[in-house]
Amino acid sequence: MEFLESILVTPFIEIWESPYYFIELVLVGLSTGVLYSLVALGFVLIFKASGMFNFAQGAMVLFAALTLVGLMEHGLPLWAALILSVATMVGLAFLVERFMLRHLVNQEGLILFMATIGLNFILEGTGQLMWGSDVKRLEIGIPDQPFDILGGKVLLNTFDVTAAFIGALLVITLAVFFQKTPMGRALRAVADDHQAALSVGIPLKTIWIAVWTIAGIVALVAGIVWGAKSGVQFSLSLIALKALPVLILGGFTSVPGAIVGGLIIGVGEKVAEGFWGPALGGAIENWFAYMLALAFLVFRPQGLFGEKIIERV
Amino acid sequence: MFYREAGQFKTTYQDDQAVFPVLQDKAAVFLLILVAYAVPFVADEYWLQAIFIQFLVFALMAIGLNILMGYAGQVSLGTGAFAAVGAYACYKLTTNIEGMNIIVAILLSGGCAAAVGVVFGLPSLRIKGFYLAVATLAAQFFILWLFNKVGWFYNNNPSGTITAPPRELFGVLITGPSASPEARYIVCLTFLIVFAWFAKNLVRGRIGRNWMAIRDMDIAAEIIGIRPLQTKLLAFAISSFYCGVAGALMIFCWLGSAETEAFDLVNVSFRVLFMIIIGGLGSIGGSIMGAAFIILVPIFLTNFPPMVGLDISTALQKHLEEIIFGVMIVFFLIVEPEGFARLWQILREKLRKWPFPY
């Protein structure tokens, strides 16, 4: 009984009694959620265009961030390192298309998924082989100062705000790219129907390279923001696991889903850790997101924004 | 020539429905089992401990996952969690009930894992494909967190680990630190053989056909009168039972003592997934071959550079290993996505006609 009360009653009383703490947690959750969205976006882009559940997205984040930091450690200025990192991600997209995708056309989703786990190993190994596996600091000049809002009752951090701003900017850029440019239209056509897209003359190989490039750049941005927050290290590749519940919550095929899902997971996680964590013994962040997503899925099996699943016999 | 089944006539239905209807297959399998039982007489302790016992445990887990994924078509990434349930249940049973037969304890812990598997299999009725795969990750993270947080599961041991107590079977010590590797090997091998035989019979009977119908198209299966609820949950239960038994063996016969990290996502769940993909989905023999491959490749990669006299640092070697392993996975998936089971089929066809292919 006491345990049930500590889960079902006490947290709500606490929320009622300390609304500012609640608001602070929500805001922190939102800013983390944007970061989750960034990683989830890379997944969605590749899934839409090639039907590939790309587990290597986390490793791509690590690889991109390691490349950037490694280049900067060799004395390159930020802008040069950035350009070179982007070039690396483009090169990676070419290699992936040439040596993996091209040979795996028409395979089942599961085989593609396993192939990306293989790619995950390759990228983690290569990144650390080239740049070493110590924790690296990434200094790109994002200010990191706490400040007050709501009359000093809620504490926020300029870093989180900047990160959220970068995330929003990226999402808007992507939205414009997808809706307004010829390449974006081609990408959406491929996502809708491979064969139909081929038959109107859209080159599938170019599209794949483009998609993996974009996913690579998204990974680079995510890597920069995460890396600046907590250092560039191996555990960066594990944020892929954080992005998975975001994906199933938002739907694999939906860009808005990735964003809204990220925000929901971010907020849910922080609030749950803050108010329910003590009763449950803490460190519930690891599985809470999955449980939350699972609960959503039982009611909407295709995720919040996923396409309605129509099955035929 | 050697593999031709011409002239082997079946005179009873029983013969016709044998697990291995071809004489050569039967002979080969019996020979293989004999060799397997003879291994402890020739292999040294390192080989038994590091390679063979590990292989047997993982082969059992791979068969379990293959039942769920290869036959029933439900993707699961929660293998490690179900194995952990088996391991912790077996630990609780043996430490709290004095004098319980160790085999009974292991089977009962498999039952506990099956119950947990059914609970986490419930969403499979509504969720399919990759959505289900990610949903089973909830089991993986939640169960391991639970075993870490709640002291009851590890008897409030200050170190947080569970250790296999010494237990005897027929007067021979088979678990715990002082049990001989030979005895532990024999126990694991017997478990694997019995369970593989059971699985083989399960999947070719009515239950297995129901699973395959659900896998190929669940709506069509439902229309021809297969109950999706019972069929899917049974697949989850039996698969988790196998994983639970394998988990119990993992602690009691292989590692001796472990924490929850031994059952984490990359070390267990993904590894077993690799095994069944590389071995062949929907094949019991394939699961065993895949397990052998995935266990042996890293060991080979670790031992190869010293063998040829290359001297490289451990960090460098670790990363190189990762890269080579990844490349091999991708290469294998491109060359033969249906795995070892398919390669074996091709080889068999070739052997039948050899040396006069027409």
Image (tube, helix red, strand yellow):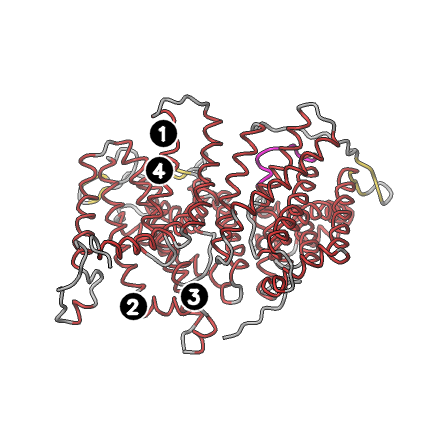
Could you tell which of marks 1 and 3 lies nearer the N-terminus? 3
Residue shown at the point (12%, 64%) measured from the top left? B7
Graded by Cα atoms within 10 Å as few (under 14), some (14 to 19) or many (20 or more), the crowding at tag 4 reads some
Of all chains, the one bearing label 1 is: B
- Of pointers 2 and 1, the one earlier in the residue sequence: 2
Of residues A290 and B318, the one nearer the viewer is B318
Give the residue at mark 3.
B215
Q: Which residue is mark 2?
A: B205
CA separation in Å, label 4 and label 2: 35 Å
A296 relative position to B273: left or right: right
State which quadrant residue B157 falls in: top left
Relative to B351, residue A57 above or below? above
Real-space Cα separation, disc 1 to disc 4, in angstroms: 21 Å
Which class describes the residues within 10 Å of circle 2: few (<14), some (14-19), or many (20+)?
few
Helix, strand or loop at mark 4: helix
Image quadrant for the N terminus of chain A?
Answer: bottom right
Q: Secondary structure at mark 3?
A: helix
Tag nearer the camera, 1 or 4 = 1
Q: For residue B303, which numbered disc appears in the image?
A: 1
Mark yes or no: residue A163 visible.
Answer: yes
* Residue located at (63% from left, 60% from top): A191
- CA distance for labels 2 and 1: 43 Å
Sequence-first disc among 4 and 2 = 2
Q: What number is the disc on residue B188? A: none
Same subunit under labels 1 and 4? Answer: yes
